[in-house]
Amino acid sequence: MIDVIDFGLTRDGEKVQLYTLRNKNGLTAKITNYGGILTSFTLPLPNEEREIVLGFDSLEEYTNEEYLKNYPYFGALIGRFGNRINKGLVTLDEKEIQLPCNHGMHHLHGGDIGFDRKVWKAEIGKNTDLKLTYLSPDGEENFPGNLNTEVIYKLTDDNELQIHYKAVTDKTTPVNLTQHAYFNLSNNFESILDHQLQIDTEFILETDDLLIPSGKIYNIKNTLFDFRTKKQIDRDIEDIENYDDCFAFGESTETPRKIAELSDKNGEVTMEIATTFPGLQVYTGKYIAAGKFGSFSGVALEAQGYPDAPNHTNFKQGWLQPGEVYQHQTNYKLIF
């Protein structure tokens, strides 16, 4: 079942709506067609209705200058290319393409105005799925090609929020879509440092101080980055200050496979992450400063392709060609 209400108007006067997905067990996910933002994700516990994502109750809170000044991309769909591209430069047919450098000297999350700030066309499907579509025109943020993007949100009766991505292009173009929700599974938003996290890989991408990949895959076995055995997030964080790393799982898969698990301190709520993507960007949110939310109030678990992939031949899926179909899926399953 999906309910629809008005969520406000953009500065250009476009009408924005909020869609509430519910399953038979009482879980609700609220999504607006502005940026495809997951504004709320709640689950029914014996003594409370627990909110587990960072978000706001109005469109104005997502669009005001104060929020955008230290923009954390709360709950948004990210595109045309999520994560970083070194100096905003890619090379196609021996010609350099300069993308916007909106994060210091580098490109981040699609540029100055990415998919996270677009009004998507929304359609409720037969199975109460919410389908969002957006046509990114040739040259938008200097990306080549018309990119037709489709994202379907589905809340199953198995307590799983599924996100299905699909895109096609008429010119070769960089593509890396993801979802930028910040999760906090406890009954408050003070900190996720006491959460337990497990990540089923012993590899991350090697990066410099500005999080630009070198192209090498780094073995993290028995290091501060090793989450193969579930551990409290803050166990080693004092030595590195903040996790903001892309954990690597090698090849993409045809169907989602479990790659990570997050639990609150007491193990009352657990979330399993399954995906077809080859990477998971884990950001523990040290630099969050937005409204009532501050440092470490949420952790982003962004299943995606590798950052800066167009500039590394050993990083697959950096480019989408005409005639190809970009297709991925990520599932967030709640156990409580």
Image (cartoon, rainbow, N blue to C red):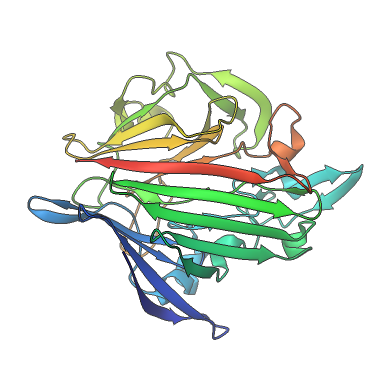
Q: Residue at x 30, y 62 (%)?
A: 292
Q: Residue at x 68, y 39 (%)?
A: 308
Residue 247 can be seen in this image? yes
> Which quarter of the picture shows residue 218?
top right
Outermost residue on the front side: it is: 126
Q: Residue at x 56, y 33 (%)?
A: 254
How far from the left and from the top, in percent, is residue 166? 60, 50
Q: Residue at x 78, y 45 (%)?
A: 321
> Which quarter of the picture shows residue 111?
bottom right
How far from the left and from the top, in percent, is residue 173? 76, 49
Q: Is residue 231 above or below residue 130?
A: above
How far from the left and from the top, in percent, is residue 112? 65, 63
> Which quarter of the picture shows residue 234?
top left
Outermost residue on the left side: it is: 47
Q: Is residue 51 left or right of residue 105?
A: left
Q: Is residue 139 left or right of residue 196?
A: right
How far from the left and from the top, in percent, is residue 217? 61, 22
Quadrant of image for the C terminus: top left
